[in-house]
Amino acid sequence: MQKLELPKMITEDKLKDLYKEMWMIRYFDEKVDQFFAKGMIHGTTHLCVGQEASAAGSIAVIGRKDKIVSTHRGHGHCISKEGDVNKMMAELFGRETGYCKGKGGSMHIADVEKGNLGANGIVGGGLPLAVGAALTSKMKKENYVVLCFFGDGASNEGSFHESVNLAAIWDLPVVFICENNQYGMSGPVKDMTRIENIADRAGAYGIPGKVVDGNDMIEIINTVNEAVENARDGAGPTLIEMKTYRWKGHSKSDAKKYRTREEEQEWRAKDGIKRFKETLINAEIFTEEEAKQLQDEAYQAIEEAVKFAENSPEPSMDSLLEDVYA
Amino acid sequence: MAVREITYLEAVREAMSQEMRQNDDVFILGEDIGVYGGAFGVTRGMIEEFGPERVRNTPISEAAIAGAAVGSALTGMRPILELQFSDFITIAMDQMVNQAAKTRYMFGGKGKVPMVLRTPAGSGTGAAAQHSQSLEAWMAHIPGLKVVQPSTAYDVKGLLKAAIDDDNPVIFYEHKLLYKTSSHVPEEAYSIELGKADIKREGTDVTIVATAIMVHKALEAASELEKEGISAEVIDPRTIVPLDKETIINSVKKTGRLIVVHEAVQRGGIGGEIVSVIAESEAFDYLDSPIKRLGGKEVPIPYNPKLEKAAIPQVPDIIEAVKETVKYK
């Protein structure tokens, strides 16, 4: 039996929940992919299949009062931050019961009360918001931490530089998490930056930078936990880069001509869910059968979400002009 | 007892200070607003009273500080962001247009962004093209933002309190050349409702709707015109979002003539919007002459003082426009 070194709050039950959560993320986005293909969901969407570990592992170490700021590829973050998959699916169907009453769609799901400050349709748009939320924590002495997710593409936006610098000089409780999935739309990260690791930029702001295997749940949990503890203790931000891969294209219109089958196969072999399952079986947290049961439960939850969405009403036309102003 | 007069600049500071004394959630952030007191001296002395936590000096990072204001507003604070020049909104555009203005609607009515972005606008200081613009029409175009343009110290104090108390993102344009102007301002806090125009001068022959510094030019023109027997009514909308259409419509119904004056470039400016309000209302039937728009010329603001002055409407331009308009009987 392999003993796992993990923070205290990551109990055996929590590990099982996390395993199920990863499958929920995968099934949710696989389902969305199918519905798009069938023309049942309109607009666009950005799927995080293959990136389940960075969302689930990072958010596992924070509590209810802590906050997250997400990206356009944010379904996984939303689910991990206590997201209700019924409301999420209903939102993608544009229904009144959705998180945003059918007005936001995939890129704008938020749950401010539960600390999800929203997905974001602007690459790099969320980083300054995370800094502001962390500022509130410090000024009101609320002692919560903000996890700020963004992609490798966003790390080349000016807002990245401004935000990390501002959070650093003010010692704000924010953890910057770069999900490096190797591509900014069709742009390979190697062609877009001269450096090997985006986390190396941390040195320029005088904060710690860490590179982790973005498909390794145990490494993610431990690294984010340390950064969160430091942030809570007033030591300021950390920049963590998670090396991962999106299995699907950038969005539904993407034929993925910029990469090869071989590359995709190579990354599929590093699947975070599969590896997490092996880890938990080796540590005797669950058996193969229990794992299968959790996976089935996740599948069921998504099937029910679809039913909920399909049976939900469209928003009333009267709602068009509502909520522009508070 | 003598009526207390303070400057427009002092009125900004007084409104902020009174709100900050009253509510711990209100704070200011911006470049050089601490010991330096801000680019125009608006926050001078405030760091001594409120300390560096609540008068937060920031790096030169307009995108991040605008976003920090949005994020802190969304999580329970009431930030006031000072941008040194309103031209720099261009650098903070994503955060104001795509984040602040949209958040509530795209989240389905959840969350609110109670922030104020204060910033000096307008020309007349010789600061040339990148420090002299009037971009309020850009902001007025975005649903989700409110836009305020005060012309007097009295209005500044009341409107700023209303802006800080408002649960929405408000862009508060201060005119650089008005900072030193004074008017009667009560010491106690008071609020002027956003969306209520002020009739700065009553008249019967023509309505002049003017914003910000143009209010003063319109009033000067009206005094000159009075000597020639022409009675001009001067209306200051004070806020262009929300816009008090009713007051403008009623005035035009009374006078039958309309001139709109603003400093911002005429093309695509807020003047076109005000003209449309009349064209689409019952006041259209009352018009005795074509409407006139006076706005900035279609050029970046030049440096040379004579050219700079010529780029925006002046008192003689307003007088001439009124005279042409009243020729129609």
Image: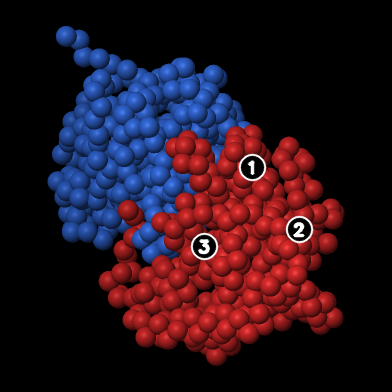
Chain colours: A red, B blue
Label 3: state its secondary structure. loop
**Residue appearing at x 70%, y 49% in the figure:** A239
Position in image of residue B329 (x %, y %): 19, 47
| CA gap, disc 1 and disc 2 | 17 Å
Q: Nearer the viewer, residue A269 or A218?
A: A218
Q: Nearer the viewer, residue B35 or B311?
A: B35
Write down the quadrant of residue A122 in the picture.
bottom right
Q: Amino acid at mark 3?
A: Lys
Mark 2 = which residue? A212
Q: Is residue B17 left or right of residue B281?
A: right
| CA gap, disc 1 and disc 3 | 21 Å
Q: Residue furthest top?
A: B1
Q: Is tag 1's residue or tag 3's residue first in the polypeptide sequence?
A: 3
Question: Do we see residue A149 in this rendering?
Answer: no
Write down the quadrant of residue B203 in the picture.
top left
Q: Is residue A93 above or below residue A148?
A: below
Q: Is residue B31 left or right of residue A198?
A: left
Mark 1 = which residue? A230
Label 1: state its secondary structure. helix
Position in image of residue A55 (x %, y %): 62, 64
Q: Amino acid at mark 1?
A: Asn
**Residue appearing at x 36%, y 74% in the figure:** A97
